[in-house]
Image (cartoon, rainbow, N blue to C red):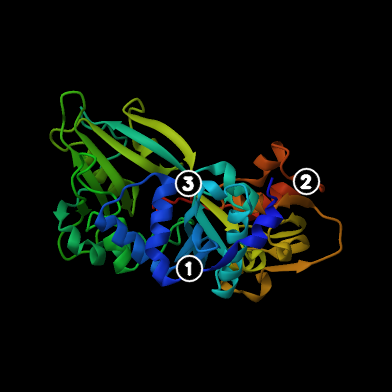
Amino acid sequence: MTTDTAARATTDIRDLAEADLDRALDLCYSVFHLKPGDRTRNFHRDLLRDGLRVGAYDGGQLAGLAGAHRRTLSVPGGQLPCAAVDFISVLPTHRRRGVLASMMDALWRRCAADGRPVACLWASESAIYGRFGFGAATEVYGIEIDASRPLALRLAPDSRPLRLIDPAEAPALLAPRYDATLPQRAGRFTRDESWWRAGALDLNGASTNAGQDGFGAARVVVLGAPGEEPGGYAVYRTRAPGEASPGVVSVGELEAESAPAAAALWAYLTSIDLTSAVRVQGRPADDPLLYLAADRDQVRVTGQEPSLWLRLVDVRAALTTRSWAAPVDLVLDLRDTALPANAGRFRLTAGPGGATREPTWEPTWEPTGEAPDISLDVRELGSCYLGGTPLRHFVHAGLATEHTPGAVRRLDAALETEWLPFTGENY
């Protein structure tokens, strides 16, 4: 049987040349059993061309691919350059030979060279990525609303007018409202106009294959009169009723400046003619809708799952960039088998104002020989980093150890955020 060491010795890991982009896409589509159209292929080619990309070559054959988009991620109190990992593919003939591990090692080096202290991904198979230090950092709820009757609400919706706008004009109008959410919720990506058009709104139909699933193209409704900044918006698609299926409104994104603004948008979405269900694949676990609804039988949670997985590539940079909700001064014994520079005992000192670099609370992460207060793996630290998962959950599960009573509670209090992190955008 071929060992990982031997396989790595015969596999050449190097930057994927631009001339190999189509070979790489063919490999990815083969592994994921996809048959995309030309528009989707062109969209993927552009994404791969503009990002970090690593290929595994066995002789003249491309046997593996790992890519990452250059994105910026909102974190508590700020933003960080992020490597959004994508296109992970290994030929079935080369599985369990260390190819993926070799590509990930190369990707970490490229993240360091590119100044990206965190990496993230959407896990197609969650069992794979924990061993590379990724932890589930955000969580989403799937929601379905019974729209066969008006949505019952506990407060009056915002009275400003609702209007449909041309999706082609949406980026300039919606961007300020979306950008306002970045300081409020960690786990969100910044967007330029190109990403608004190709990703969030899918104006060329490449990322959702609009029409092939029975749903139409994206529609955009905004709250507020022409000429004023919207108090909220929703991006959605509709499907007409069929013989055995109801008419459905599929909501891709909804942002609102307040609870009444959100109520107005949800009330609109549940009132669209010839539809009897509103479905949302991903909403934050603390979505106000779950409390606004006067009848919870009408608003049903249909699923709960991890969304964005996070990897702290440079722990020092990540911890000293985010803000902190409470003072903390603890020694952490951190395990990181993939990136040994992160591993060891470190004293973390931080507190409110850390992200603004106030002298009193400038966060630090320094090596120490002192006894640890907490022992944990970088995977668990990644899960806690955005404020979505308390570390005590991992202690209760036996995956982290508290050596000093009360230490975990103090760290949880420092990591806490007002709103849970949320990632609704699958790149």
Q: Is residue 300 left or right of residue 224?
A: right
Amino acid of disc 1: Leu
The answer for how far apart the CA atoms under marks 3 and 2 are is 27 Å
Other residues around mark 2 within 10 Å, as few (<14) / some (14–19) / many (≥20): some
Q: Residue at x 24, y 67 (%)?
A: 172
Residue 109 vertical position relative to residue 270 in the rendered view, above or below: below
Amino acid of disc 2: Glu
Tell me the quarter of the image containing the C terminus. bottom left
Q: What residue is pinned by disc 3?
A: 307
Q: Is residue 134 left or right of residue 39?
A: right
- Disc 1 or 2, which lies upstream in sequence? 1
Tell me the quarter of the image containing the N terminus. top right
> In the rendering, at what x and y percent does residue 194 appear?
30, 67
> In the rendering, at what x and y percent does residue 9 appear?
67, 62
The answer for how far apart the CA atoms under marks 1 and 3 are is 28 Å
Residue 37 seen in render = yes
Q: Nearer the viewer, mark 1 or mark 3?
A: 1
Amino acid of disc 3: Ser
Is 96 or 267 nearer to us in this picture? 96
- Disc 3 or 2, which lies upstream in sequence? 3
Q: What residue is pinned by disc 2?
A: 402
